[in-house]
């Protein structure tokens, strides 16, 4: 696992420095473009066209590290209205809700908050 983390550092830095990727703005005004986990990378992009920007960089990383993209697990969460060309090009990948290490991200912020608080509230109710 340590080797994977070390091998993913160059990828993470390349994605952070790429000005063509806009990422996801958090409530604390941080911009997140990539999250790396022991066996997974999550790219947070504003437009599906940014996916095409990620691919060449990720392919270079794959050659160097042996990591591969699992197209079946690839999910795209659009935080705006989906365009018709995006529906045609990314139909299978576009989701209204994705889960990243237990945190839920949704197109509907109210649902996102509810989903993320549900487990905490359940645990709290059991404790009381």
Image (tube, helix red, strand yellow):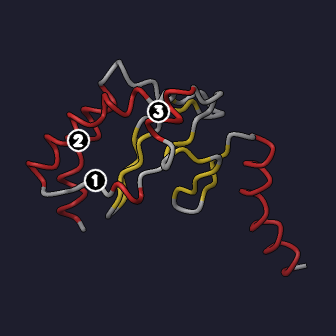
**How far separated are the C-alphas under marks 2 and 3?**
14 Å
Picture mark count: 3
Q: Which residue is mark 1?
A: 69
Query: Is the C-beta separation of discs 2 and 3 under 8 Å?
Result: no
Looking at the picture, tell me which residue is in the foreground, 102 or 126. 102
Residue in view at x 42 percent, y 35 percent: 33
Q: Which residue is mark 2?
A: 58
Q: Quadrant of residue 118?
A: bottom right
Q: Residues within 10 Å of mark 1 (few under 14, many from 20)?
A: few
Tell me if mark 2 has few (under 14), some (14-19) or many (20+) residues whose alpha carbon lies within 10 angstroms of its own.
some
Pointers 2 and 1 in contact (CB under 8 A)?
A: yes
Q: Earlier in the sequence, mark 2 or mark 3?
A: 3
Q: Is residue 96 left or right of residue 64?
A: right
Q: Residue furthest left?
A: 64
**Residue under numbered circle 3:** 45
Circle nearer the N terminus (2, 1)? 2
Give the residue at the far top of this rendering. 19
SS state under label 2: helix
**Residue name at image x 32 percent, y 63 percent:** 38
Q: Residue at x 19, y 56 (%)?
A: 67
| Residue 100 located left or right of residue 42 | right
> Element type at marker 1?
loop
- In the drawing, what numbered circle is on residue 40? none
Horizontal relation, residue 14 to residue 127: left or right: left
Mark 1 in CB contact with mark 3 (< 8 angstroms) = no
Relative vertical location of residue 37 with respect to residue 1 in this rendering, above or below = above
Q: Position of residue 4 (x, y in %)?
A: 21, 60
Q: Nearer the viewer, residue 25 or 80?
A: 80
**CA distance separating discs 1 and 3:** 16 Å
Residue 51 lies, in percent from the top left, at 37, 34
Secondary element under disc 3, as helix, strand or loop, is loop
Q: CA distance from mark 2 to mark 1?
A: 8 Å
């Amino acid at each position: 696992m340590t080797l994977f983390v070390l091998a993913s550092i160059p990828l993470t830095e390349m994605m952070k420095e790429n000005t063509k990727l806009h990422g996801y703005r958090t409530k604390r005004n941080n911009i997140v473009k990539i999250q790396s986990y022991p066996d997974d990378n999550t790219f947070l992009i504003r437009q599906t066209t940014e996916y095409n920007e990620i691919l060449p960089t990720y392919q270079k990383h794959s050659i160097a590290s042996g990591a591969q993209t699992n197209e079946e697990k690839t999910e795209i969460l659009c935080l705006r209205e989906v365009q018709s060309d995006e529906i045609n090009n990314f139909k299978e990948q576009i989701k209204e809700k994705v889960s990243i290490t237990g945190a839920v991200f949704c197109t509907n912020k109210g649902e996102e908050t509810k989903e993320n608080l549900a487990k905490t509230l359940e645990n709290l109710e059991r404790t009381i």
